[in-house]
Amino acid sequence: MNLNLTNKERLLLQDQKSHEEICVQKYNDYANMASDPQLKTLFTQNAQTEQDHLNTINQLLNGQIPNLNQGQSGAPQQNQSPTQILRQQSSPQTSAQQSNNFLGQNQSGGYQADQNLCTDMLMTEKYVSGAYDTAIFEFRDPQVRQILNHIQKEEQQHGEAIFNYMQSMGMYNPQ
């Protein structure tokens, strides 16, 4: 199917494309910078999903609706969310034990640096998710809206996984 975008729709997709490019770059950079192996894994997995989002946005910009049966971001997937993967990887230790172990292994400031990386990515995910929310309401084509909604849901899952990681490590304590 060929997609005929309005000027506004094209501009919104170009914005989302730039957001996805930044997310891919940040997640890859932060995976290399992270001290905690669990955080490296989380960032690496999120980078891969963000690359899928970027590929989907590029298809839309090229006037193509992604084939929903080929595992593109626009398709409902059976894959596990980053949060589910983190839960499986987590040992039965308490949050305090995890935090103390990590602090003990990273006296050089790795814990604080990882906290800063997480805080930045959480803020980024909040912004990107909000931008998708706006874009979804501006599209005429229901299939495109569904694709953008699915991407937004994955952005929210990224934020949830980062939040859960931070909370489990004592980095984020909502009051």
Image (tube, rainbow, N blue to C red):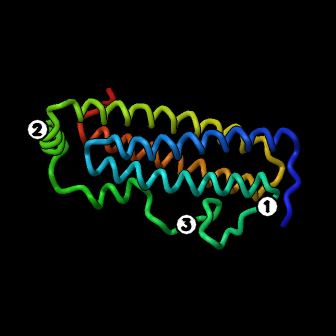
- Dot 2, crowdedness within 10 Å: few (<14), some or many (≥20)? few
- Kind of residue at disc 3: Gln
Q: Which of the two labelled residues, at mark 1 and mark 2, occupies the earlier sequence position?
A: 1
Left or right of residue 28: residue 175? left
Amino acid at the residue labelled 2: Gly
What residue is shown at x 21% (from left), y 30% (from top)?
Answer: 109
Q: Nearer the viewer, residue 69 or 63?
A: 63
Whole-angstrom CA distance, mark 1 to mark 2, is 51 Å
The residue identified by callout 2 is: 104
**Left or right of 97 on screen, residue 126:** right
Residue 141, quarter of the rendered image:
bottom right
Residue 164, horizontal then vertical, whole percent? 34, 44
The residue singled out by tag 3 in the image is 77
Seen in the picture, residue 90 relative to 138 is either above or below; the reply is: below
Cα separation, mark 3 vs mark 2, equals 39 Å
Q: Position of residue 57 (x, y in %)?
A: 69, 52
Counting other residues with Cα less than 10 Å from the Cα at mark 3, is it few (<14), some (14-19), or many (20 or more)?
some
Which part of the image, by quadrant, shows the C terminus? top left
The amino acid type found where label 1 is placed reads: Gln
Q: What secondary structure is found at the residue carrying circle 2?
A: helix
Rendered residue at 42%/45% (across/down): 160
Q: Return the mark for residue 64.
A: 1
